[in-house]
Image: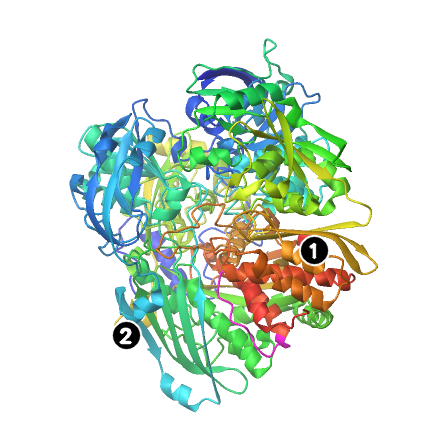
Amino acid sequence: MRTLTRLDKDSQRARQELKDQIQGDGPLACHTVKSSGARQAGQSSIHESAEKHVTGKAAYIDDLKTPSDALHVALGLSPVAHGILTALKLEAVKQAPGVVDVITFHDVPGDTDIGPVFPGDPIFVDQEISYAGQCLFAVAATSLHAARRAVKLASIEIDEQPASLDPVTATQREEFVRPSHVQERGDWQQALRQAPHVIESELFVGGQEHFYLEGQACVVLPTEDEGVIVHTSNQHPSETQKLVAEVLGIPLHAVTVEVRRMGGGFGGKETQASPWACIAAIIARRTGKAIRLRLPRSEDMRVTGKRHPFHNRYKLAIDQQGIIQGGEISVIGDCGYSPDLSDAIVDRAMFHTDNAYSLGDARVVGHRAKTHTASNTAFRGFGGPQGMMIIEAAMDDIARQVGEDPLTIRKRNFYRDGRDTTHYGQHVDQRQLLHTLVETLETDSDYWERRKAIKTFNGVSPIIKKGLALTPVKFGISFTAQHLNQAGALLHIYTDGSVMINHGGTEMGQGLHTKICQVVARELGLSLEQVRITATRTDKVPNTSPTAASSGADLNGMAARDAASKLRERLFDFAASHFTAGLDREGMRLEEGMLVSGSNESEQRIPWGELIQTAYLNRISLSEKGFYATPLIHYNRATGQGRPFYYYAFGAAVSEVSVDMLTGEYQVDRVDILHDVGTSLNPAIDIGQVEGGFIQGMGWLTSEELKWNAKGVLVSDGPATYKIPTFGDLPPIFNVALMEGHPNSMASLYRSKAVGEPPLMLGISVWSALRDALSSLTNYATSPRLDTPATPERVMLAANAIREKTL
Amino acid sequence: MAIIEFLLNGVPKQCTVSPDTSILTLLREHLGATGTKEGCASGDCGACTVAISDLADTPRTYTSANACITPAHQLQGKALVTIEGLAAEGQLHPAQAAMIECHGSQCGFCTPGVVMSLFTLYESPDKDTLSLTPEQLEESLGGNLCRCTGYRPIRDAALQMHTHSYERPSWYNAFLPQASSSNTNIQNSNECFFIQPTSLADLTAARLRFTDARLVAGGTDLWLESTQRLTPLDQLIDVTHVKELLTLEADEFNNQSGWWVGAGVTYTQLEPLLNSHFPAFSQLLQRLGSQQIRNRGTLGGNIANASPIGDTPPVLLALGAWVELANTTGTRCLPLEHFFKGYKQTALAADEILSRIFIPKPSNTHALRVWKLSKRREDDISAVLGAFSYRLEKDTLHDVRIAFGGMDAIPKRALTMEKELESHKITVDIFRAAQAAIVQDFTPMSDVRGSDVYRQQAAANLVERLYLTLSAPDQEVMLHAYAH
């Protein structure tokens, strides 16, 4: 086993405790602090900003006040997808009313490449234009309106070239942003040769616009030395700090990045928030003024990357029972023009082409196609959902082939004893949990009764057809880039006993800050009101990882707990040695705002405020940092084998739909969800993530359609043309529950599980139910291909191809 | 630039605004009130929802609006309520308390807008917050996009508002200090103005005098030119105070009884009439934009805009509506189909305005079917909209009028299809012929809302749906969510 991290003296006790939990044999080694007896470890505390949200007091970037001479920045964007910039004449822009500064590629003092992991993302176009919406120049003016109007005065000459927009063609031409990768286990070719049936198909899976309600925004203030302070709506402040320092050519300690909250992130502010901070920082240093930059919605949608569209194929060997023996799956991620995070995203797609099913002897290939669109990026699920789609398509196809219910086929293929290792070599723990979860949901949702009723209904209803599907989720938790699985926290106790916690994670609505406050309150035996969290800042907790991969609470919660438990132990040591009453160090605890020692008659209590005051007067440090690194995980890219995930989170959803086969319109009539979060840290917040994730996943696969014109210009560039789910899309019956009584088998934060991304993939059940309804048109003999998003257009065209017409 | 006077959360304000200043700009940039958020600046997301009330109304009623596309000038003499006002006197409004209790906010950015929509719902005199129907909730909240929650906790908050007590703050009954006139004719120069004529005579005179000026009513489309394309809107003639444009009266015209609807009548104001006489049209309205848009957008705007995908023109074409055009010398009337000349081109002369629309009263045996197809059921623009109007007598179709939106450069009647069906018995053959007529009547295009192939097939399937509706009336051929 890997060492957790280098042990330092102060935290030895805490680390030892953690180590015991991981190495202990029992299913659940002791918690450091017992929960208050409730079934769930955590309480359903309200979001720490809830009252500020509903009164309009919660401040987002564009709400921040700046000095009256602050400048506003607008961007000049490429109107074409591919070409060479031959002339950029900006005289008229510079002369325009209110304009103070105009910058291009040549005005960047330091590095011009702001690729987050691999190079390839120029801050401004130098010569080659790689997508429509790429940044050519920036204008700073006394108002945003003046800046935006000045941008329109630019004279741009481009030698336009044909744009490559099809990822499959790009793959054939081997136009990749990163090399392809293979995961292979067993003799998959033999499996295909020997199987009774071989079944194959393909699927196009559409991308998705993040549509965070708060668009990309930052405010940058120059400091008195060579640096800047950056306020940004951002999931990865440390990366922005690094990139801003690099474009300015200054050390990282001259740049401070602060994030109080985001108006939504969903992955869209992991790498895509940095360019604007870099541009604003350059102008802040040039002009000495505070700089405000926010992207109007349509520009935001054109310049930033999205969820990767994928083109996936499978060729699977199945036995008479429909159980997969092996085969080959290939996934092509449409990465856009640059690597960005695509290497890890396509990897995650590959890691999830099995979803909850054993692929047997299988080979999975992942390609990273380069096209002339914005560089596609992280989005809740990070490639996982796109990878899962192909095996869920296969499950439905296999069911029709062998004439069984899709649920039967899914269950037959679940990981089970003897079929418990993934195609990348990880052993699937908690297999039984998946079986139990699905069986519970099957019963609670009356799956089989409803299946019968639906068949009867469809038999007599020629136009309206109902569909039903249960789809599971098994999602791997950890960053697949190993070094990102670390986190820090900083805890202060002030002399009045009030507590301040900071950590490396960012709040984007997911309730991370609330959970962290709950962790600290619990470790210190305080009420939530006594613990406050403030903005995430790179000068408080350095070198942080992005708040991504569902890891926010897992990593930062552990770090906060580390800090709190270290401080607690220090206070115990102090109390035992200081208070003359002779407090018993053994069994000392913090609860309900008191330090308590002994029990029954010997019990002694010291109020928290008194404890802290006394500790301060006795010169005990009341500040502590915490740190955490996830143990055990490793992955060898050379062999395509390893244990990339600390654990898996599970869930399942049953969706029932009604489809109008004449128009392709449909409605989701009922949804039942059972989701595994281990021992919940905050059931209300977790339910919120499950419901919100499901609806977002449903939107991705149904109404959210990205469209580019033939020249590669995004035409779905606003909410008028890009339709995320709205109030009426909420299923009228929506039963959502958290799986209880199944703590995480791994030593995670109070045995909880990550919840940010996994529920998004529950939305696949809606798509599968639509296919089920379509399949009824052929009496379930075939399963029509249904690319996504399954808009009414796609559903109608699929139905029209197979249905019996009245006229 | 002009000075407007209005109440902001009960406090009198005097603000200097230019013609193209939106309420959102006024709030965020001039007044520093940043509780109201900009999510899209196109009236589609609802993050900037505010509530507006007429000071003359007793009790005061509030209508929601998207601040991003509502002209600040139209606040003159009105009461504006924003998120900052609700909890003014130390207590949360029930909308706010319920949202907290139900975990209705996650990132919180859409929340002020959601709360304002809940506020107008709570204050609505015709809705009982104790027994809200799913339709009412959808109507009130369909215009507020939330990307985080999936809406369930917001629905719960709406249903639980009534459990929270609330003492109305004193500002509810505040008035402007002096009797401000409800409209202004402030005009600094001939280059830059926002005028608010009160009579048709003044309006047509202004139209004649300022040939470059744009007409504005709800601003739900016009304002996008300012926020999205940065087109200067320096010269605006506001029609919302022209009394002749606000009327809705039963009348005779062209030997038909019917209703004259002023071009400035909003969708919300039109609802009761449509509800009583054209239920299918009324159902369509529930899917036209959002509550915020329906409160502001006008029937005249939807027609004069001449978009091929406007929702009401195909229905009005099928109903045989007429339009009345006015200039300083008088008025002329023409059938609606003669109004649309080409893509976004109309029969309006430079000095004319669209003043009224005549909707003939349907006979007792008349039937109207309106079917709108879009990616999303609520608050989406049509890919295809088919409107079918006819009388059915002894299995024979009479007075068939059919029109489609989204199938051509203009909203257009399906003349060949009408001929195929007119005075024919309902048979498979004549409906097949009607389907075949689509290619003669229409040349649809491919765009962001759908492909030409889809539009062709969808239109044909709507004809099939009509056949099924007529030949097998007991069969379910529509989803409940779409049929209400």
Q: Position of residue A319 (x, y in %)?
A: 50, 86
**Image height check: is B228 above or below B86?**
below
Residue at screen point 74% across, 71% down: A460
Eye-nearest disc, 2 or 1: 1
Both marks 2 and 1 on one chain:
no
Residue at screen point 62% across, 19% down: B199
Q: In screen coordinates, is A345 left or right of B388?
A: left
Q: Position of residue B413 (x, y in %)?
A: 62, 50
Q: Position of residue B38 (x, y in %)?
A: 46, 35
Mark 2 residue type: Thr
Mark 1 residue type: His
**Image height check: is B414 above or below B82?**
below
**CA distance separating discs 2 and 1:** 54 Å
Residue under pointer 1: B480
- Magenta-drawn segment: A778-791
Residue under pointer 2: A639
Q: In screen coordinates, is A143 left or right of A399?
A: left
Labels in figure, total: 2
Considering the whole magenta stretch, tell me its main secondary structure: loop
**Image height check: is A757 above or below B181?**
below
Mark 1 belongs to chain: B
Q: Position of residue A538 (x, y in %)?
A: 29, 41
Q: Is residue A783 magenta?
A: yes
State the quadrant of the C terminus of chain A.
Answer: bottom right
Q: In screen coordinates, is A428 left or right of A46?
A: left
Q: Is residue A658 magenta?
A: no
* Closer-to-camera residue (A724/A186): A724
Q: Quick check: can you spot residue B252?
A: yes
